[in-house]
Structure formats: structure tokens, C-alpha cells
Amino acid sequence: MGQDLSIKKCDFKITMNNNNHHTEEISTERLMVRRGQPFTITVSFSAPIHSYLQQLKRTFLTVQTGPHPSKADGTRTEFPISSRGEQKQWSATLEEQDPCFWTISVNTPANAPIGQYTLLLHASKSYCLLGNFTVLFNPWCQDDEVFLANEAQRQEYVLNQEGITYWGTENAALAQPWDFSQLEEDIVDICFTLLDVGERHQQDKDHTQRKNPIYICRTVAAMLNCDEFRGILTECGTGQYYNGTPPSKWLGSSAILRQWVAKQCKPVRYGQCWVFAAVMCSVLRCLGIPTRMVTGFTWAHNTNSRLSVNEYYDEDGTLLIQNKESARVWTFHVWNECWMARGDLLPEYSGWQALDATCQEKSKGPSFCGPAPVQAIKEGDTEVDYDVCYFFAAINAKCQVWIQKADDTLQPALGGTKYTGNNISTKSVGSERCEDITHNYKYPEGSLQEKEVLDKVYRKIQKLETNSSSKTQFSSIPTALEEPVNLFIHLQSKGSLLLGQDVPLSVEVFNHSGGKKVTHLVIGAQSVHYNGVPVTQLWKEEFHLILKSNEANNLQVFVPYSRYRKQLGENHLLRLTAMLRDEDSFYIYFAQEEISICDPSLTIEFPENMVQYQPSTAKISLLNPLIEPLEKCMIVVAGRGLIYRQRKYRMGSVQPKSTQQLQILFTPTQAGLRRLTAHLTCLQLQNLKSYKTIDIAAA
């Protein structure tokens, strides 16, 4: 008669397995595996195996996940230990046996639900707990829906923790550093807490849904897209950041996610589109879904899938404030793309999927958008799930400018039509270069393909609008105004300028008509937030021009620095406008340009050679180009593998036209490419960030 089965220990071979599964940076103490790929364990018995012959005649492994594991729903599975395993399902193969131990290869199916698992050994009537492990999506496995064939892209979109998001304008994209931190050990636990909380809010008890990357993306987006009672982040009106962190001050995702958990899963204050997208990128990369951040310049927001947007100005060319819910053109907007096969759609819709966690005003469904196949957006296949129609409208809508007169009547401005989706960009693979991916979303402007796609969408709109029983998903086909060709106005400035410089404007006015024209020209500048909300009118000049037939007039003017220095807005965006009124016909001609005001130079210098575990020094230099001192300067420095968490340094005041330097002492703890980020705040500046990457030699 044999003894009762007794396990001495189970070695999960964490170092080897985690290296094989590309999770070694997440943990060196816990088993983290990617589905569809085997891992190896060694089970050591308390006595020689022949003592347990009766119990070991039929031996099984049991895996289970979720709050209520069940064989019926697939969250509990039992499978035999055999001489050959199954590739497509849970299986175990005995690779090596000794009188006192077994080495077993365990295979996970490529469609297993992600999550925390328990592993048990079942022999005869005995169950022995072997340990716990975590299963993630696997972009390295061909049978996984998130499989990505290119290794450089897997390194970038799954494992790279240091990202860049782009602000500014379509003519001058400004790089902003972001630390995703997706491989820090506690982040994976926070991500699964996030899924748990999201499922409770949705009252979704089907744990097997976690095998589906579409479900995971939509659950995470719903949790980021916060309301008063749930979610990770609170969205707030621009500039109104009471009792919280302004969105521009965040340096990375980990501080937000840790604060959310520490506050018992109450929303963190505050986020805007780039913060939502950055945290989304961290969570999805952590779970194993290839993800990137995308910036679109001139984005039509809250269109509710309409293809036309209106902007309203007064007779001085001042942009007027609209309701928060109103559709408006944002200077830039940041969303995500995640890579996956779409088994629910035609094969051509697999690949990059657009996913937007920022709140949208929609006629039905949740207030986030996606995942929407980028190919469907490009082809105008607006009926495809999910929310292709919203993305299509956001990057294809036309914006008509209206002038609100003193009596509150509206007059269309001629020549002022603005087009959206002009530049869509992301960080390129393996470098810090900005890559233009507009061609993924749209055919070339003016091409036959673009015309065919727009015609196809317009036909769908007309069909919906003529069908009274159908609610229109689209509406408001842009109509071209009949524009007289009597006058022409063109406004030009530099795409970006250094803070402290006067803003040069060039305005050209041309009289095409056969007779003399008496005109009134108003040139203005105002500061605006990234989402099209005006901050304040800063400056204007008026001119009375008499133009002969076929005469051109070129004006060169400057907006003085003194007029914008104190009311620039957190995104440092200026909208320049020129409005020309024909005094005979009272037609109004309009032109506009948006420019970025760039912060002073904050440079980071490293020694030529740096070695892991050897003390080193970085030098940070701040050049003040202004005619006034920068006061109460403080620098926050961070860098994974270089500095633990964050350090703060007070620099005091930096005098006009002078440079001040700061020496940072640190000891690199990790080899390879490492980034140091510096964030300066002072009375005059709130969002001056700089970064530099250095290759640390291994000790």
C-alpha cells in the first residue's frame, strides 16, 4: 500500500520561463507566461516516486482562473500528464523523470483568457497546490489574435517603456516624453484590478471574455473614460485643475495607476486626451496587446459622425466660446492604435485598430470609440464595428467659419473652410523620429481614390436621410458656398516660434475684380487651448484698404511678445486670423493660421561613457531667452534604471539672457538604452520638458 502523495516543492523555473516569454523585466520572482507558448516546471516529491505508484497511475494538472472557476465555462481545466502534449489546448508533457522529481512542459492554448491562474497537481483523490502564475497575450505566437510578425515592432509596441506623444500644430509637431512603465511589477496587478473593477461596473461575470482582445480594449477604454463614480482619470475643463495635477505635469502612467489603487479605485485628477491615450497604451502593452499612441492634427471632435463642423467668430475675428458638447475642431487630438486580428470581421480589417478613450458625444453606445479597423476608416466602410463612422468624420469633416454680427445674425465667411485630418503621426519604430501615418487613414488629398471614398460615404448618408424609418448615423453633408472670386486673402506665419519672440505675420490681399474695391481688414491673435476653446483675445490691428483692379497688397505686421506673455494658455497655441470685409457687397473673406510658441532650451548632457553601477553625473542647462528673470524654478528629474522614482531640485531664479546649470549625481542600475527626463516649472512656465537617451554599458 502506497503513501499519501506529498510534494516537497515545485520549481516554476521563473528566470528561464520569463526570459522565454519576454516577461523577465516584469518580474524575477513570479511566473509570467504568454499564452500559446509552453513553460517548464519541476515537481519534487517528498519520497521516491515508486512510493506513490497507485496515486500516479493517472496524474492530471488542473489550471483555474477567475473568482468562480468552472469546467462548464472553461475557467477550470483538467488535463493529463502524458508523453506528448497538444499544441492547441491545455496540455502537459513529461519531459524528464527521476526517482524524486518530474520535469513537465505545460502548454497554454493561444486563446486562453488572460489573468491570474492557479496550478494544481491531481493524482488519485489528492490535489496538491503547485503555485500561481499569470497569463498574458502573446504577440510572438502565430495562433494568438494579437500576433505581430515583425520583431522590431514587437520590441517597440509591447516592450518599450519610453514613449513620445506629439502636441503642437500640423506644421510644427512638438515631442513630449512619456514613461509608460508597463513592465514594472506592480503595474500588471493594477491592470488586472482595473479589469476586475470594469467588469463589476458592467455587471459582466463571464471571465472567459478575457481571451478576446476586443473585449479587453473596450473594457479598459470604458474604465479610462471616467464618470463621477468610477474610472481611472477625471477629465476637466481646460485650465480648471482644482485640487489635482494638471494634465501637462504628468511624466508617466505609473504615478496615475498607483494613485488610483491607493485611492481605493477612485478617479485621479486630472487627464486630457494625451493622458488617457498614454495610460491606455501602458495597460494594453502590459497585458500583451501591441499598442501605440497616435496624434491627429486638426481633429473634428464631438461631431456625432457628422461631416461638417462650424466655427463662430465675431466681427473682430475673435473665436467665440461654444457649449462643451458642441462639435469643434481641435488643434490636435491623441488616441491609440492596437494590433489584432478581427475574427468578427472580414480579413482585410485585421491589423491596426483605432481606439479612443476620450469622451465623445454619441447618439448611442458608450462614450469611447473603437476598436475601429484603420483600413475601414480609410475605405469609408462606416458601418463596420466599432465606431468607424466617428473616426471617419473626425478626420474628413469640413469646418465652415461663420461671422456673428452685432445683431446676432450669422454670415458665412468666404475662403475660411478648414479641413481636418491633415497630419496623423506616431513615434517611429526603434527611434525618436516622428512618423507620418496619414496615408494609413486617408488617400492622398485630391486623388481619385479619395473622391471615390467620399462619394461612397455621401451616398450612404443620402440613403439614410431619405429612409425616414432609419435614424441617420451621419448627417450634414458639407455644401460648398457659392463664393464670388472678387477678393482673395492669404495669411502666413512661422509654424513655431521661441517664447520671447514677436510673432511675424504676412497678409496678402488681392483684388480679382474688374473695378476698385474698398475694404476693411482686421488682423488678430488669440490664445487657444488644444481643444479649440479660446483663452483670450491678445491683439488686433485694423486697416482700411482701397484696392485697384487686379492689385495686390502685402502687409507685414508683428504681434509683440508683451501682448501674449501672460495669457498664453497651457498648450502655448496662438490662433492668428485675418478678416477682410468688402464694403460694397459686405462679403467677408477669412483666413486663419495656428502656431506653437516653443519653450526655452533645457539641455541634458551625459559623459561620453557610462557604465552600470558606476557613479556618474548629468548636466542640465537652462537658457532664459526672455528679458525678465525666470522665477521660482524647480526641476523634476526621472529616469528608469538611472534614478529611483523622481527627484526634485530647486534652481531659484534664472536671470534674463543667461544660462544656469544643474549637476545631477546618479548611479545607473540597468544597462542598455536609458532615458533621463527633466521637467521644469517656474512662475512663467509650467510645461518645459526635455529628455535624452544614453546607452549604459553593462558592468
Image (tube, grey):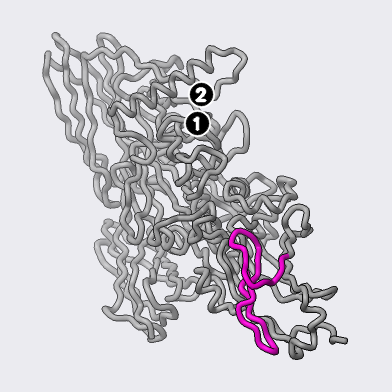
Q: Nearer the viewer, residue 580 or 226?
A: 226
Q: Nearer the viewer, residue 674 or 203?
A: 203
Q: Quadrant of residue 683?
A: bottom left
| Helix, strand or loop under label 2 | loop
The reply to whether callout 2 and callout 1 are in contact (CB within 8 Å) is yes
Label of residue 474 in the image: 2
The type of residue carrying mark 1 is Cys
436 lies above or below 10:
above
| Helix, strand or loop under label 1 | helix
Q: Which residue is mark 1?
A: 389
Ranked by sequence position, the earlier of labels 2 and 1 is 1
**In which quadrant is the N terminus drawn?**
bottom right
Q: Nearer the viewer, residue 471 or 7?
A: 7
- The part of the chain drawn in magenta is 79-106
Q: Looking at the image, how many numbered discs can be counted on the residues? A: 2
The type of residue carrying mark 2 is Phe
Q: Position of residue 635 (x, y in %)?
A: 41, 67
For the stretch drawn in magenta, the main secondary structure is strand
Q: Position of residue 600 (x, y in %)?
A: 30, 58
